[in-house]
Amino acid sequence: MTITSSAVRGRTDLCTAIENELSGLIGKRASAATAYGPDFARLWALAGQNVLGGKFVRPLLLMETYDALCQRHQQYDAADSRQRETAISIAAAIELLHYAFLLHDDVIDGDLVRRGHPNLIGSLLAEASATARTDGADGANGAEGVNSADGVRGTRAGSSLHWAQTGGILMGDMLLAATHQSFARADLPHELRLRLLDLLEHTINETVAGEQLDVGLGDGVIAPDLQTILVMCGYKTATYTFELPLRAAATLAGADFAVENSLATAGRHLGLAFQLQDDLLSTFGDPRRHGKDPFSDLREGKETAIIAHARTTHAWPDIEPFFGMPELSVGDGEHVRRHLSDCGAEAFVQGLIEEQMHAFNSQLTTTIPASVRNVLLDLAGQLEGRQS
């Protein structure tokens, strides 16, 4: 482990501790990767650039919940620093899991950019394309040579994308393996380690099931009813973003199983509200604030709760011709957005969010300790006010 302090305090210090742990996890593997050549080592170098410096939503939720639980049980003192270091290593591993999911998601969606910058696949593609252009220029001599080079460039463009996406899949696979290694090697009693590994397996199963549902909905293989969409949102977002960190924190802190279950239920409600709100922002939010293409979900034909409600209204015949149209213009996009709002889809999803937040707040009054309640209320406040 790379964390030695027994008194890490505050969110900034937590971020530093998590980043140091991640640097150690990735750095060790990056050094070992050099034995397999520069291309393999490059995967780890790019992964390090993308993983470090993130928001760390999941590891911070784990650690702040863990600290709050330990304060309640009066378990945290200088003698517990080693146990806290273990908690930080698990929190960092969950960030690796998050990035592994993002990489596979980028391959599935064909994305080359994330948050305005090339993702790992986009970086690999740019590097491979630059090499292909150099090689093509060297071989382009005369008219016949140019035609030949054009054909080679066309072939190489497809090969470069295949190379880049393969890198994304393989790096995602390696990060999944690294996550399991961190959980399996955690300095914990055997039964506790097995419990965390079971949580990890449950999380991966549900997230992969959610991804399959998402693709099936988008490809028209699975019927886009509201209940299926909500289940998909829960699997893809709530399970690994909220439920896993909360359950892991409770397990590491030695909390009662009733407390763990209450935290997981609260996390599921908060996670579903988060995803529903994200869908609203993508369709109705200010793109200058959230930084996304305001009509990307409509162009993609993404099956959201917004669309599920619109399908049941008189406005759907006016919306359907434009839904899933890759070349959707700004004017047509605004036309669809107006219809979605007028038919009540926006208000309907806002109502679903309110229902989830009400259920979340109700769950806080059960067995969840007051110290942890404050952590969750702070997180809920951030989600309710976000614009991006």
Image (cartoon, rainbow, N blue to C red):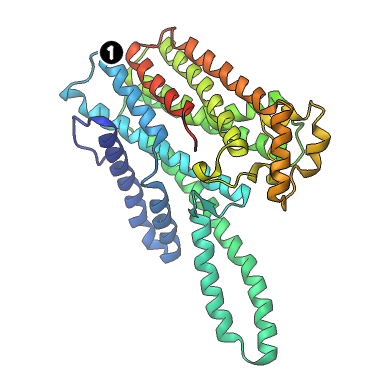
Residue 184 shows in this picture: no
Residue at the far top: name it. 366
Q: Residue 38, how many percent across, how many down?
A: 41, 66
- Using the image, determine if residue 300 lies above or below residue 227: below
Horizontally, residue 366 falls left or right of residue 348, namely: left
Horizontally, residue 222 falls left or right of residue 149, namely: right
Mark 1, residue position:
72
Q: Residue at x 46, y 27 (%)?
A: 244
Horizontally, residue 59 falls left or right of residue 333, namely: left
Q: Residue 308, how many percent across, how many down?
A: 72, 29
Q: Which residue is drawn at 27% across and 12% down?
A: 73
Residue 266 shows in this picture: yes
Of residues 366 and 160, the one nearer the viewer is 366
Q: Residue 324, how many percent across, how many down?
A: 74, 44
Q: Which residue is drawn at 53% across and 20% down?
A: 269
Of residues 15 and 5, the one nearer the viewer is 15
Please state the total of marks drawn on the protein image.
1
- Tag 1: amino acid: Arg
Q: Is mark 1 on a helix, strand or loop?
A: helix
**Number of residues whose C-alpha sits closer than 10 Å to that of mark 1, classed few (under 14), some (14–19) or many (20 or more):** some
Q: Which residue is drawn at 38% across and 19% down?
A: 250
Residue at the far bottom: name it. 142
- Using the image, determine if residue 145 lies above or below residue 171: below
| Residue 78, image quadrant | top left
Q: Residue 79, how many percent across, how many down?
A: 17, 23
Of residues 380 and 217, the one nearer the viewer is 380
Of residues 28 and 295, the one nearer the viewer is 295
- Using the image, determine if residue 196 lies above or below residue 167: above
